[in-house]
Image (spheres, grey):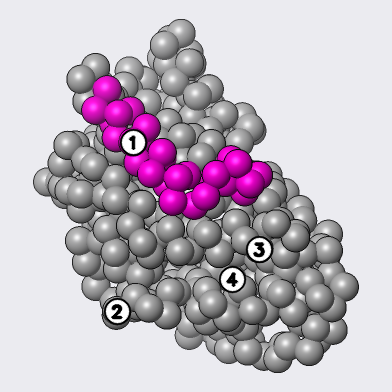
Amino acid sequence: MNFFGFAAGVAATMTLLSTTSAFAVTQISWWHAMTGANAEVVDKISKDFNASQSDYELVPVFKGTYPETLNAGIAAFRAGQAPDILQVFDVGTGVMMAAEGAIKPVAEVMTGAGMTFDKSQYLPGIVGYYSKPDGTMLSFPYNSSSPILYYNKDIFQKAGLDVNSPPKTWNEVWEAAKKIKASGASCGYTSTWLTWIHLENFAAWNDVPWATQQNGLAGGDVELKINAPIFVNHFQALANLAKDGTFKYGGRTSEAKQIFLAGECGIFTESSGGLGDIVKSGMNYGIGQLPYDSDAKGAPQNTTPGGASLWVFGNKSDEQYKGVAAFFAYLSKTDVQEYLHQKSGYLPVTLAAYEATKKSGFYEKNPGRETPILQMTGKAPTDNSKGVRLPNLPQVRDIQNEELEKMLAGQQTAQQALDNAVTRGNAAIEEALEN
């Protein structure tokens, strides 16, 4: 099912696509940050879209990591050479929202192309994150994800752990990691994206504030709350495990995936979107929900969307916008969303694709694959778990990473690291609001 319906007469007008030639194909540029198995998904979706019609040619271009892709898009816009579509990770949402005039809301792109746009057909938590307070949807949720736990069943078995029972709490993770290290493994536990998984989603999953003003969604005058005892205790445990290599730090983004794929660590927390490479590796793996703090009241709550969405730049031609709209309509088709979800591990963004996948028996045949969806949709979000939004979240994350890296290197305690992250982060937020 396609949730973008063509209005009467649009099909006829879309055949004339060029001011120079009625037979010209309009190229649509798509800058993205997908690698490995997820890059293969991008290529297949692009080729299939191009083969499905003859009016547009979608041209995907890899631009580096998520931060590098965002920076490349900003630089290209300033130079007057912005792509039509830019994939921006969730952290950059506040940056793009603040760039009024630089982007064209996806809702306007669709209606401007003569299509109806029904956002009720998308997973509510995802739609809410990528919309303005008045409900206007700003970007298309291409690859939404939730952090989950992966584990190597062979390493679990060697350590005497139950291969059918992944740890559910962080204390259970710590104990299992110690047993894995003691069994001869290089390390017990590793994780990608410490800021996203261990700060932002840790707060949401345990229903504690990451910052004031509903973590920035209710207003810009935000103060960080990540030096509360629950965060300090969590990171001090990580720091203690890092001393003898039980926890192994891989890097600020997805670098730790290679540590897990190499069979060094038995437990790994990562985006559900990392599944494609794990499946491709042939590892005997299992999936568990994101661990929660056993002392947090009401935990687990709900996780918040990660991954990325597709933003459309302003000042493009009507023909380019029609091409973008046609591509987004194609992306919304149930069979396309089923493929993206089942192949990559990212969440299906439409309710129809989720129901179709469930009805097909996919989740029964692939235990754990429904976990990221259930984590995000199992409970109604609270003020602590709707998401995180700042106009300069990439900068604030860099500050947090710097302090956490010093902690993991033994240069400061978790309390000192998080106190410094709050002081420096609050100053950066205040400065961003003044400029």
From the viewer's perspective, is residue 74 above or below residue 246?
above
Circles 2, 4 touching at the beta carbon (< 8 Å): no
Answer whether residue 407 is magenta in the image: yes
Residue 197 image point, x, y percent? 49, 57
Q: CA distance from mark 1 to mark 3?
A: 26 Å
Ranked by sequence position, the earlier of labels 2 and 4 is 4
Label 4 with label 3: CB-CB less than 8 Å: no
Q: Secondary structure at mark 1?
A: helix
The three-letter amino acid code for the residue at tag 1 is Thr
Q: Is residue 39 above or below residue 265?
A: above
Look at the numbered discs 1 and 2 and tell me whether their residues touch, using CB distance below 8 Å: no
Residue where numbered disc 2 is placed:
297
Tag 2: amino acid: Lys
- Comes first in the chain, label 1 or label 4: 4
* Disc on the earlier residue, 1 or 3: 3
On the image, the x and y values in percent for residue 315 come to: 32, 18
Extreme residue in the left direction: 134
Q: Which mark is residue 149?
A: 4
Q: Residue at x 38, y 78 (%)?
A: 295
Q: Secondary structure at mark 3?
A: helix
Q: Please rate how many residues cluster around mark 1, counting C-alpha atoms within 10 Å: few if below 14, some from 14 to 19, many from 20.
A: some
Tell me if residue 375 is in the magenta stretch. Answer: no
Q: Nearer the viewer, mark 1 or mark 4?
A: 1
Residue 349 visible from this viewpoint: no
Q: Nearer the viewer, mark 4 or mark 3?
A: 3
User: In the figure, residue 88 lies in which quadrant?
Assistant: top left
Q: Secondary structure at mark 4?
A: strand
Residue at image mark 3:
241
For marks 1 and 2, the one nearer the N-term is: 2
